[in-house]
Image (cartoon, rainbow, N blue to C red):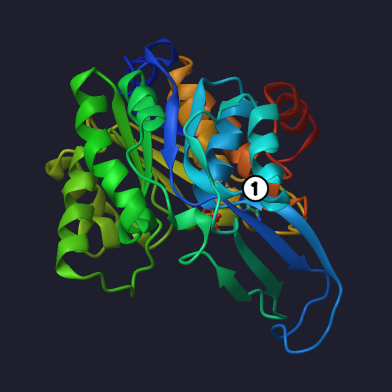
Amino acid sequence: MTTTGIESRITMASVLAPDQLGPTVCVGEILVEIVATTVGDGFLDAQPLVGPFPSGAPAIFISQCGRLGGSAAMVGAVGDDDFGRVNVERLKRDGVDVSAISVDGEYPTGSAFVRYRQDGSRDFVYNIAKSAAARFGWTKPVSDLIGRCGHLHVMGSALSVPSARDVIDKAVYIVKARGGSISVDPNIRKELKLDQDTEERFAKLVSMADLLLPSGEELERAAGIEGEANAIQRLFQMGVKEVVLKRGADGATYFSRDGARVDVSAFSVEEVDPTGAGDCFGGAYLTCRRLGMSPEEALTYAAAAGARNVTVRGPMEGAGTRGELDAFISATERRA
Ligand code: ATP
Ligand code: MG
């Protein structure tokens, strides 16, 4: 781990609302994932599968928050079926408040079948847009939850889902008005062109972010400018308070507005299933910060959470508790 900038600046007051203000809330798709156990091309032949695993990027994120002992809650919907129960029971067990997850009597729980190819890319069969996962809204339980929310975490990809967008649009202002904070994982590929309305919403949300958690090229995509240093500078000009850049197996970097920077190397692990690394990393970083840790300490837990999760098959099966992450940190070497 290398640290540049003055140590004392790194322990400065957090830009994120403390855990006591109220739960971290994540809004979006709740899915089961069913994973092919062999590597190959797609699903055109009968083949061995394993699952259902609880999934959906927002659900993975909030599961990691809950497991680490942060106050956490989820907004979304499942069907009245076993796939839905798998998710709700998991989140409850992780300590997540599920009062604002609705159960849709008509539509089934969302699902994704995934198979890895030889080159590491993935084939998917999705049932999301026309499932319960995309059918929720501003109900009384959601309104009650947002009224006591301390932090809202937004996935950029949720902005193209109407139900999530409607909830997020209202929630950001309510949360900010009560002194809460906002984090954004852009989660939007560099090449992806959004319609103008979504693009504007995305830029506005980025400018309101107390914490931005981009991965790789999403940094430049969110900033609208090429080059890492330029992008960081532009984001701070836009209003972002803190940026943590995820670099996969190359680790991660924290940047603050006043020029402080902390780099962490990744842990050395054997990757079994990369899905969910970014969400576990983000959920752990945010939770540790809200619980009062310094960026450096939070980054270590985050890198451990991301790395531990890729060693286990299933999108959130490897999310760790504080004790599990402490054990992982002391037992695992860092990459050079
Ligand atoms: P996702 O693929 O879930 O969208 P992401 O692109 O948002 O993830 P990554 O940078 O892939 O985010 O992963 C987040 C963090 O998890 C990394 O910064 C790193 O600390 C850890 N991590 C991810 N993959 C590995 C790996 N193979 N080995 C060790 N650590 C890893
Ligand atoms: Mg990502």
Amino acid bearing label 1: Gly
Residue at figure coordinates x 73%, y 50% from the top left: 82
Whether 301 is drawn above or below 194: the answer is above
> Please, what secondary structure does the residue beneath circle 1 have?
helix
Q: Looking at this view, name the residue that lies furthest to the top.
A: 20
Q: Is residue 117 left or right of residue 60?
A: right
* Residue 204 can be seen, yes or no: yes
Disc 1 residue crowd, few under 14, some 14–19, many 20+, Cα 10 Å:
many
Residue 115 image-quadrant placement: bottom right
Whether 76 is drawn above or below 21: the answer is below
Q: Looking at this view, name the residue that lies furthest to the right.
A: 48
Q: Is residue 263 left or right of residue 199?
A: right
Query: At which x and y percent is residue 120?
Result: 66, 74
Q: Is residue 35 left or right of residue 280?
A: right
Whether 125 is drawn above or below 135: the answer is below
Query: At which x and y percent is residue 54?
Result: 67, 49
Residue at figure coordinates x 15%, y 58% from the top left: 200
Query: At which x and y percent is residue 86?
Result: 71, 44
Query: At which x and y percent is residue 145?
Result: 39, 25
The residue that label 1 is drawn on is 84
Residue at figure coordinates x 38%, y 32% from the top left: 142
* Residue 264 can be seen, yes or no: no
